[in-house]
Amino acid sequence: MLDEAWTLSPSVALRPEPFGALAYHFGNRKLTFLKRPELVVAVRALGEHPDVRSALVAAGIPATQHAAYAEALAGLARTDMIRPRGEGVAA
Amino acid sequence: MTIAPARPTADRPKTGTLVEQFELGLDAPICLTWELTYACNLECAHCLSSSGRRDPRELTTEQCEAVIDELQRMQVFYVNIGGGEPTIRPDFWHLLQYAVDHQVGVKFSTNGVRLTPERAAFLASPACNGYVDVQISLDGATAEVNDYVRGPRSYDTALTALQNLQDAGFTDAKISVVCTRQNISQLDDFKALADRFGATLRLTRLRPSGRGADVWDELHPLPEQQRELYDWLMAHGEGVLTGDSFFHLAAFGEALPGLNLCGAGRVVCLIDPVGDVYACPFAIHDNFLAGNLLADGGFQRVWQDSDLFADLRSPQTGGACAKCSFYDTCRGGCMAAKFFTGLPLDGPDPECVQGYGEAALAGERTVPAASQDHSKAAPTRNQPVMLTIGQRPDVLAPPSAPPVSACAENPLAGFTP
Ligand code: SF4
Ligand code: SF4
């Protein structure tokens, strides 16, 4: 995943909260919590970077933690909070 | 966004579990219930909001639109609408559309009285964009059990509404059941009923709120029924919604899925028909009144600045529960259930499954007087049998569930942290 291009789903809104953010998907109506502010920054940055890794770097996340963040992102992908940025789904 | 929230955010820990974070409160609620009217066509014996008559101070259409605008700004993504019977407000369908158009999804609870084939078709149409959830209240899987508590013909009304929704192609309606002494034995039947209508079953806890206080002794599940309910939820929990309302049952052993905490004033609250903001839909009492959105500068001001909410978000002690080994998941149970049965808020729940509630109920206590009541002054032909015959022994007819209203308790239903 780290080398792929991803983005926040168009039907998802992020609401800032003291611990991070609440993500709501207007399509499937799932509510998810992003439990770290760094994760929120990274998720917001996804669409503006060529791949996930550079979004994590831009969010100031050290390389040693990239694998853990990739796992958190995979969790978000399972409910379509974020999605791969292929042709036709550009942000 | 406000610049200077009055509540203490400075020393708020950045880490900790979600439950710990939620106990400290959020910038906006996750589970907001909005009761649009106290008027109701029915007179359910256990109505949590003591509804019946419209309050003359009810928010106007314009005031309701302003509330929706504010919820959109606060990013409250959906609201649980109840009452009273919300659909008897003439502007109900307009407000529903207005909310959906402003990115505020709606889950509304109804007894079904206005769910005609035309309305069902509207709900299933692209105009609602899938942002609308419908909960039909039903407190018995048979007319006998349901109508005992909800009133004559209310079972037929609910089933007609479900049929109309299904015929219109509305998918996944909810059948919302308040679990009582009389319907716990019908859990399988409720499930079958839900399957029949392509609906999802939603079970919630009976609380001694509103008129529920008067009938709680007769309606609340017996200790062995709590066990039955717990076992049933463990076996069938998947695919059944609970509003996370049974977290006090966690003390039977394994915690049920969902959030284990009382969200009152932290992630949950209620806006009532006149704009009063309470900590929880089951806590309509002056002690839990945080403010009024007309008088106090809007909902956001009340949510973020009220002294009551600041207090509810400050660290709480477990009191007599603190030494209980199940405190981590049970958290002492439901604040409203304790308050309305006259028990201390930092002690065990009246339905504590470790048995401490019964002991507490047997002791010295004063049940608080209701601070408001919109019940009809004179009973109508819709009055449930339960009330017309006084305190009838349980053997006869079963009562059942809740009022027409609904977010029930814990908000985060259905979502896993
Ligand atoms: S003693 Fe308190 S924490 Fe323990 S099970 Fe009873 S209500 Fe829950
Ligand atoms: S219903 Fe009870 S447990 Fe749930 S939020 Fe209200 S007071 Fe708390």
Image (cartoon, rainbow, N blue to C red):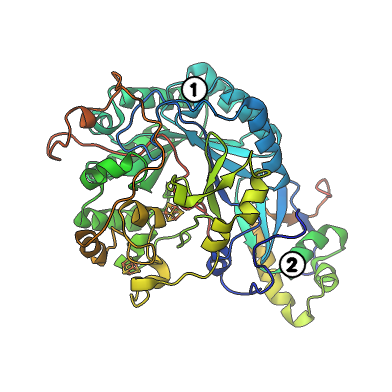
Q: Ligand 1, what quadrant?
A: bottom left
- How far across and down, in percent of the image, does residue B217 sit? 22, 47
Can the viewer see residue A5?
no
Q: Dot 2 corresponds to which residue?
A: A1
Q: Secondary structure at mark 1?
A: helix
- The answer to whether the residue bearing label 1 lies less than 8 angstroms from the nearest atom of ligand 2 is no
Q: Around disc 1, counting alpha carbons within 10 Å, would you say few (fewer than 14), some (14 to 19), or many (20 or more)?
A: some
Q: Quadrant of residue A22?
A: bottom right
Q: Depth check: A73 or B279 in front?
A: B279
- How far across and down, in percent of the image, does residue B120 sit? 52, 23
- How far across and down, in percent of the image, does residue B209 sit? 36, 45
Residue sitting at x 63%, y 63%: A75
Residue sitting at x 15%, y 40%: B394
For disc 2, the chain is: A
Q: Dot 1 corresponds to which residue?
A: B88
Q: Depth check: A34 or A10 in front?
A: A34
Q: Amino acid at mark 2?
A: Met
Mark 2–mark 1 Cα distance, whole angstroms, equals 52 Å
Q: Which tag is nearer the camera, tag 2 or tag 1? A: 1
Q: Secondary structure at mark 2?
A: loop
Tell me, for residue B339, which label it has, or none: none
Q: Amino acid at mark 1?
A: Ile
Do the residues indicated by labels 2 and 1 lie within the same chain of the protein?
A: no
- How far across and down, in percent of the image, does residue B336 sit? 39, 53
